[in-house]
Amino acid sequence: MPTSAFFTKKRDELVPAPHARGPWSPDMLHGRLLGGLAARALEERHAGPGLHFARLTVDLFRNSPMLPVTVETALVRDGRRIRVADAVISTDQGVIAQARAVLLRRGEQPEGERSTVTPAWDEPPPSGPPPADGVGWKPPFDLWRVTEWGAPGPGRVWMRERFPLVDDEPLTPFVRAALAADFASPLSNVQAEGLRFINADYTMTLARLPEGELIGVESTGHVSAGGVAAGQVTMHDTTGPLGFCAVTAVANAVAMNG
């Protein structure tokens, strides 16, 4: 069982540990970590008093081998109520992902009843460790599958990170949410025969940041045709819903079984 962070910082590069690999190939970086690295850099360099990270879009351009990565950011817009910043993630083989964050200024909550309100789900937090995984790729995070994997109907999971992202840095709530958001793809796209879509991106929208270490993800939609899929999930913590995540995905020739 690994005990180290997913990445070690060496000069300007982040060097991946062996457990940073993804489920599709033993020599491929997991896309969820690229979103986490983008969130970390954007928060570190572009957060501000009174500003909330309301959206993070992560575009996964290409599969990357287990190579050191660099993360560069740029401020795109800095207005009174809206700040926008971009991140570009690269290896020595070129750009592998980019991300855009939208920060909104917090203010007074409007009074009155909303016509549509996402309800809190009725799943209690897990009371013990996750069950032992079967064969295949073992997720380097705690995963409780509330519903049967690939069964008809909305899927639900609880997730909890086990390792730091970079060195011994504590995970912030925003980075924790960005890591969990990538699970929108397998949860919304899985079927009884396994996962036959691999996502090209994900867009997480948050009304608030998660509280605590547990994040719940519930699939709420899937549409696919011609080998292209669109999926969506609702994200929760133990106090209620906090936001959504949408993904686009393309059919993959080899199914991944969970």
Image (spheres, rainbow, N blue to C red):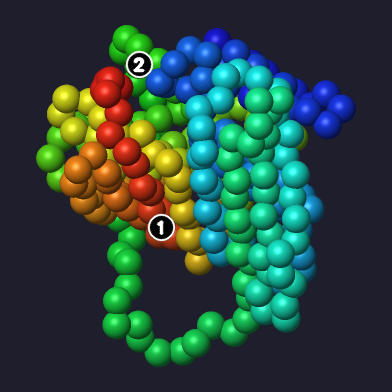
Q: Along the horizontal axis of the image, is 195 left or right of 42? A: left
Q: Quadrant location of the C terminus?
A: top left
Q: Where is residue 146 in the image (x, y as percent from the top left)?
A: 27, 37
Sequence-wise, the earlier of marks 1 and 2 is: 2
The residue under label 1 is 244
Residue 81's label in the rendered image is none
Choose between 23 and 63: the one closer to the eye.
63
Distance from disc 1 to disc 2, alpha carbons, whole Å, reads: 27 Å
Residue at 45% x, 48% y: name it: 202
Residue at 27% x, 44% y: name it: 228
The residue under label 2 is 133
Q: Along the horizontal axis of the image, is 116 left or right of 37? A: left
Residue at 30% x, 28% y: name it: 252
Q: Where is residue 51 in the image (x, y as percent from the top left)?
A: 69, 69
**Residue type marked 1:** Phe
Q: Position of residue 143 (x, y in %)?
A: 40, 30
Q: Residues within 10 Å of mark 2 (few under 14, many from 20)?
A: few
